[in-house]
Image (cartoon, rainbow, N blue to C red):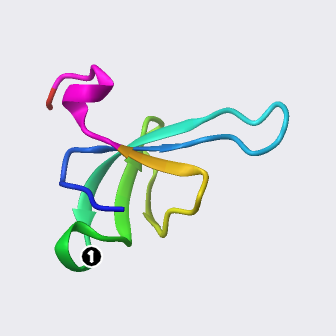
Amino acid sequence: MNARIGDLLHVHGTVVGQHDRVGEIIEIRGESGGPPYVVQFEDGHQTLVYPGPDAVVESRETAGHPAR
């Protein structure tokens, strides 16, 4: 999994009733775009994320979100 700053991290809900979460990658701490990532979620919460198999990185262009 590789990302660039500004890409989106989409974490799929893993249980019934749990919503997907989408956040913007604002810092990359791994080598060559690898995890962990500092992500700012839609509610403003920032956290360090080591994405699991339920997460995908989407570029803003392919996800249909304008650049900030």
16 relative position to 32: left or right = right
The N terminus, quarter of image: bottom left
Depth order, front residue of 33/45: 33
Q: Is residue 61 magenta?
A: yes
x and y percent of residue 38 in the render? Answer: 35, 63
27 relative position to 55: left or right = left
Q: Is residue 22 magenta?
A: no
Residue with the most extreme bottom position: 31
Residue at image mark 1: 29
Residue with the most extreme left position: 67
x and y percent of residue 7 in the render? Answer: 25, 44
Answer with the quarter of the image where residue 15 lies.
Answer: top right
Answer with the quarter of the image where residue 4 lies.
Answer: bottom left
Q: Residues within 10 Å of mark 1 (few under 14, many from 20)?
A: few
x and y percent of residue 24 in the render? Answer: 32, 44
- Above/below status of 51 relative to 30: above
What kind of residue is marked 1? Arg
Residue found at x 41% / y 43%? 23
The C terminus, quarter of image: top left
19 relative position to 60: left or right = right
Answer with the quarter of the image where residue 35 lies.
Answer: bottom left
Residue found at x 55% / y 39%? 21
Counting every numbered tag in the picture gives: 1
Residue found at x 75% / y 45%? 14
Depth order, front residue of 50/48: 50
Residue with the most extreme right position: 16
Residue found at x 25% / y 38%? 59
- Above/below status of 25 relative to 15: below
Magenta span of residues: 58-66
Q: Secondary structure at mark 1?
A: loop
- Above/below status of 4 relative to 48: above
